[in-house]
Amino acid sequence: MKYKLESKLLNTNLDFAPQIEYVDSGDVNNPNIIIYLLGADVRPIDNAEFIINLSNTHRVITIHFPSKHNYKTMGKLGADKYFAVYNEIINHFQFKDIDLIGTSLGGSLAIKYSNIPALKVNIKHIVAIAPLIQAVKVPFFKGLLKLTERMIKRTYQQRNLVPVIQHLRHFMHLKALLKITGYIAELDITKDIETTKTPTLIFICGKDDLVGHNNTFFELKKGDNIKHRVFDDADHSLLFTHIEDILEDVMGFIN
């Protein structure tokens, strides 16, 4: 099935992101808001099936940063730049209450964002799908190659090209990906998971080459507000291979 999503641009005063690309899906009058944070160098269309299903019950704002509009201006990336972009979107729409969902790096940033001081929006729930937890120890490019190889084999069996095309795209914007992975190399959200006060659902992949098996949720001190589900047979492409299970769990968690 082919999905269509229309990207829009928000003009800002941020020198590293003078334009922020986003997608606004669902009923604009729906008071139930989801902010969706994409993984590293992933486009909204790559996760279109997930976004469109969420927009059946919620208004979904998908933030695409960095995108092709930011590759030349973004400089060295850090959490502060991501958070400034999120604030621009939230302030532009004047959102007061949101659910925050992120995939891969987006899931990590969702958890970190919930802990920043003087947050001006109420985050009702967080969902982190295959988040990078302690990526400092992960050979990211090696894991990316292994993941792509595995998906090519799966594609041959299932005749589904979409996951492979998405991950091959990582190598199209290699310079941008290097900047992103430069931040990923410093990422550690173990303390953020322990300290977040927001009800949080984390999906863990048992065979995740990008996160690393030793960096799973089991090594963390889980807070009382943290729920998790482990897919023992899943790799980092969890959102493609188990989308129905994830959608069911997400809807049950945030509704």
Image: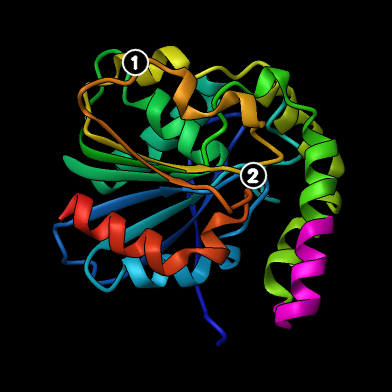
Between 71 and 223, the residue placed more toward the observer is 223
Q: Quadrant of residue 153?
A: bottom right
Q: Main secondary structure of the magenta part?
A: helix
Q: Amino acid at mark 1?
A: Glu
Q: Quadrant of residue 138?
A: top right
Circle 2 sits in a helix, a strand or a loop, which is it?
A: loop
Extreme-front residue of the structure: 232
* Disc 2: which residue: 207
* Disc 1: which residue: 194
Q: Amino acid at mark 2?
A: Lys
Question: Is residue 176 shown to the viewer in this render?
Answer: no
Extreme-bottom residue of the structure: 1
Across and down, in percent, residue 75 comes to 72, 26
Question: Is residue 75 shown to the viewer in this render?
Answer: yes
**Residues drawn in magenta:** 149-160
Q: Which residue lies at the image location 25% right of the left edge and 45% below the top edge?
A: 99
Verify whether residue 209 appears in magenta: no
Q: In the displayed structure, does residue 107 sit left or right of residue 228? A: right
Q: With respect to residue 248, does 127 lie above or below?
A: above
Q: Which residue lies at the image location 85% right of the left edge and 47% below the top edge?
A: 145
Q: In the displayed structure, does residue 189 sit left or right of residue 120? A: right
Q: In the displayed structure, does residue 117 sit left or right of residue 182? A: left
